[in-house]
């Protein structure tokens, strides 16, 4: 059963370009993972907000993703680069 995530990441204004680079690296690496079905990154045109739309084959695949070095690197730097991170785990209903 697929796992769907939406992550909303608000960058600090002064770190937007550094954060964008890190997030794009996460996209490139995450898309190579066996359990990754979808890993899309969007950027707001009006402020410093990034939005991930993710789909994972199963919870085990997501758990493995959450242990990857590039994701752990992001977590280690998130406090310095972001103002807020909100993650929604959802179920597809239509």
Image: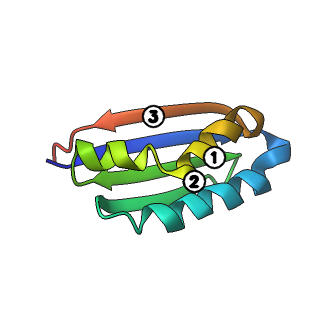
Earlier along the polypeptide chain: callout 2 or callout 3? 2
Asked if marks 2 and 1 touch (Cβ < 8 Å), the reply is yes
Earlier along the polypeptide chain: callout 3 or callout 1? 1
Residue 18 is tagged as none
Pointer 3: residues within 10 angstroms few (<14), some, or many (20+)?
Answer: few
Give residue 42's quadrant in the image. bottom right
Q: Is 53 on the left or on the right of 83, as rendered?
A: left
Residue 73 is tagged as 1
The relative height of residue 41 versus residue 93 in the rendered view (above or below) is below
**Which residue is found at the position 37% from the left and 63% from the top?**
33
Q: Secondary structure at mark 2?
A: helix
**Which residue is found at the position 13% from the left and 47% from the top?**
1
Give residue 84's quadrant in the image. top right
Pointer 1: residues within 10 angstroms few (<14), some, or many (20+)?
Answer: few
The residue identified by callout 2 is: 70
The residue identified by callout 3 is: 87
Q: CA distance from mark 2 to mark 3?
A: 18 Å
Q: Secondary structure at mark 1?
A: helix
Q: Is 71 on the left or on the right of 78, as rendered?
A: left
The relative height of residue 57 versus residue 4 in the rendered view (above or below) is below
Q: Is 18 on the left or on the right of 3, as rendered?
A: right
Residue 25: horizontal and vertical position, in percent? 60, 63
**Which residue is found at the position 51% from the left and 62% from the top?**
27
Residue 61: horizontal and vertical position, in percent? 29, 50
- Between circles 3 and 1, the one closer to the viewer is 1
Asked if marks 3 and 1 touch (Cβ < 8 Å), the reply is no
Indicate how the structure is coloured in the image. rainbow
**Which residue is found at the position 50% from the left and 64% from the top?**
29
Q: Secondary structure at mark 3?
A: strand
- Between circles 2 and 3, the one closer to the viewer is 2
Q: CA distance from mark 3 to mark 1?
A: 17 Å
């Amino acid at each position: 059963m697929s796992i769907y995530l939406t992550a909303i990441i608000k960058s600090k204004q002064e770190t937007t370009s550094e954060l964008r680079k890190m997030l794009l690296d996460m996209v490139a690496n995450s898309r190579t993972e066996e359990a990754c079905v979808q890993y899309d990154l969007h950027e707001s045109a009006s402020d410093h907000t990034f939005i991930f739309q993710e789909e994972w084959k199963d919870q085990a695949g997501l758990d493995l993703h959450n242990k990857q070095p590039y994701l752990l690197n992001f977590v280690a730097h998130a406090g310095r680069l972001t103002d807020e991170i909100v993650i929604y785990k959802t179920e597809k209903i239509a």
